[in-house]
Amino acid sequence: MSTRKLIAGNWKMNGLADSLVEAETLSRALIEEPANCRVALHPPATLIQRMVASLKGGPVELGGQDCQAEASGAFTGDISAEMLRDAGAHLVILGHSERRTLHHETDADVAAKVEAALRAGLEPLICVGETLIQHQAGDAVRVVVRQVKQSLPEALKGRRFAVAYEPVWAIGSGQTPSLAGIEELHIAIRETLETTFPGSGAPILYGGSVKADNAAEILGGKEVGGALVGGASLRAADFLPIVRAA
C-alpha cells in the first residue's frame, strides 16, 4: 500500500467565485507547512479553471466531480474528461453514491467513465459503498466487492488510481461506522484489488462524515489510505485539520 495518503475534498454543487479564497487559504497554509499527504480539491466545474489560476501551481491538486464517457457530442449539460483536463484538472471523482442514486449510474456506466478518464490523462477516484438497507442486511462486503470488480476496468492496470469506500448511509448524516467496520471493508477492497491489480498500491480512501474530531482515528485504520471529505472541505479552517491528521 502507498505510504502517502490522499485527502480529497468534494465540494459537490457548492462554490461561487468568492469561494476561491478558501482554496487560496488552504494552499498558503500548505506552502508554509507542507502536508504529509497529497491534497486535492474537487470544486464544481465552473471554478476549476479559475482555481488553477488562483493557486498558481501550489501544492493543492485539482479534480472534477464527474465526466461523460464520450469525448464529445450531443450531450447537453455534460462535461467530458477531455474538457476537465483542458480546464486544468488532474483527477476526477467517478461513481459517487449521489451519481449512482440520483442519476441511476450502474457499475458499467462507472467503468466506462473510468476508461474515459484514463483516455484524457486524468487520475480516477472511484467510489463504492453500500446503502443503509444493504448495511443492515449484512450485505456490505458482498455489495462493495461486486462494485469494485465491476466498476474498475482492466484498463487501470499499470495506471494511477484510487478507490473511495463511502457507506451511503453515513454520507452527510453525522453517523460514522466503527473503526472495525471501516477496516473490514477496506481490507476486503484491498484483497479484491490485489486479485485484479496486484501490487498497484492504489490508496483506498474512506468517505462518510469525516471531520476534524474523527479524522486521526479513521486515517490510522488498516488499509485506510486517505479520506474523501464532503462538507468539511468547503472551508479551509475545517479541512486543514483533517489534512494535518494524515
Image (cartoon, rainbow, N blue to C red):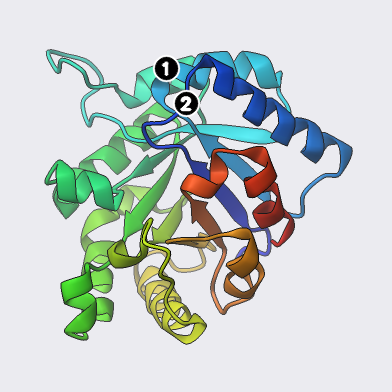
Q: Position of residue 100 (x, y in %)?
A: 19, 49
Relative side of 197 to 111, left or right: right
Relative side of 230 to 105, left or right: right
Q: Amino acid at mark 2?
A: Gly
Which quarter of the rendered picture does the C terminus lie within? bottom right
Q: Residue at x 64, y 60 (%)?
A: 212
Asked whether the residues under the numbered discs 1 and 2 touch, taking CB atoms below 8 Å apart as contact, a structural biologist would say: yes
Q: Residue at x 25, y 68 (%)?
A: 130
Asked whether residue 159 is in view, the answer is no
Front residue (pair 217, 152): 217
Question: Is disc 2 placed on a helix, strand or loop?
Answer: loop
Q: Position of residue 230 (x, y in %)?
A: 46, 48
Q: In which image quadrant can residue 150 be found?
A: bottom left
Q: Position of residue 9 (x, y in %)?
A: 52, 44
Q: Which mark is residue 32?
A: none
Q: Residue at x 25, y 55 (%)?
A: 151
Front residue (pair 220, 83): 220
**Position above or below: 86 against 8:** above
Are there few (<14), some (14-19), or many (20+) residues within 10 Å of tag 2?
some
Front residue (pair 13, 149): 13
Are there few (<14), some (14-19), or many (20+) residues within 10 Å of tag 1?
few
Relative side of 162 to 5, left or right: left
Which residue position is annotated with label 1? Answer: 46
Q: Earlier in the sequence, mark 1 or mark 2?
A: 2
Q: Residue at x 56, y 24 (%)?
A: 19
Q: Which mark is residue 15?
A: 2
Q: Position of residue 24 (x, y in %)?
A: 70, 26
Q: CA distance from mark 1 to mark 2?
A: 9 Å
**Position above or below: 126 against 87:** below
Q: Amino acid at mark 1?
A: Thr
Q: In which image quadrant can residue 234 be found?
A: top right
Asked whether residue 121 is in view, the answer is yes
